[in-house]
Amino acid sequence: MAIKRMDNVLIVVDDLEAVKAFFIELGLELEGQTDVEGPDVGRLIGLGDVRATLAMLRTPDGQGIELDKFHTPDAVRFGPVDTPVNALGIRRVMFAVEDIDAVVARMLTHGAALIGRMEYGTAYRLVYLRGPEGLIVGLAEQLG
């Protein structure tokens, strides 16, 4: 059996409301939010006594980002909030955008910090931003 599609990527967060607002401002839509808890959830993810709030966001083309705020057990932070891009593990999420300058300007007014920008030949303009909790978001605008 073949993979049909990627459904979502999980990001564990401490400040669910701030991260959710950041992604909504970026252009994702809140699909829903719920609390989960109990032994079935704990067995699924390999933890005991789980209680968490989940928020599912979707891009206009249906790709998902799930944000989880753990109430029990407490979330564990590995490394600094401003972990560098070359640290092992998942480091960023990249979105294709139109009018990258307008998106960057809007996100900077909502607390994002500019990491860097470049043009990739004549194909793309790229920008890396750091959002709440140190999340790195890449933006790509196709040229031509």
Image (cartoon, rainbow, N blue to C red):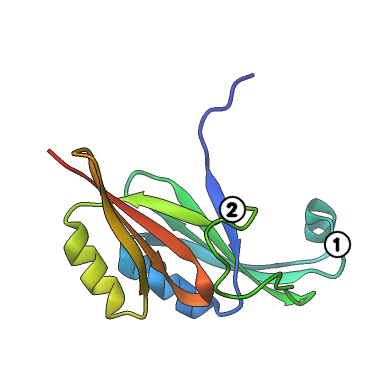
Q: In the displayed image of the protein, which residue is found farthest to the top?
A: 1
- Side of 72 where 11 appears, left or right: left
Q: Nearer the viewer, mark 1 or mark 2?
A: 2
In terms of image quadrants, where is residue 137?
bottom left
| Residue drawn at the location 80% of the way across and 74% of the way down | 73
Q: Which residue is mark 2?
A: 90
List x then y, in percent, for residue 5.
Answer: 51, 33
List x then y, in percent, for residue 83.
Answer: 58, 68
Up-down relation of residue 130 to residue 4 (above or below): below
List x then y, in percent, for residue 59.
Answer: 37, 52
Q: Are marks 1 and 2 in contact (CB under 8 Å)?
A: no
Locate the C terminus by quadrant: top left
Q: Amino acid at mark 2?
A: Ile
Mark 2 closeness class: few <14, some 14–19, many ≥20 residues within 10 Å: few
| Residue drawn at the location 55% of the way across and 80% of the way down | 15
- Side of 64 where 116 appears, left or right: left
**Is disc 2 placed on a helix, strand or loop?**
loop
Q: Which residue is mark 1?
A: 39
List x then y, in percent, for residue 120.
Answer: 27, 43
Out of 115 and 77, give the one closest to the viewer: 115
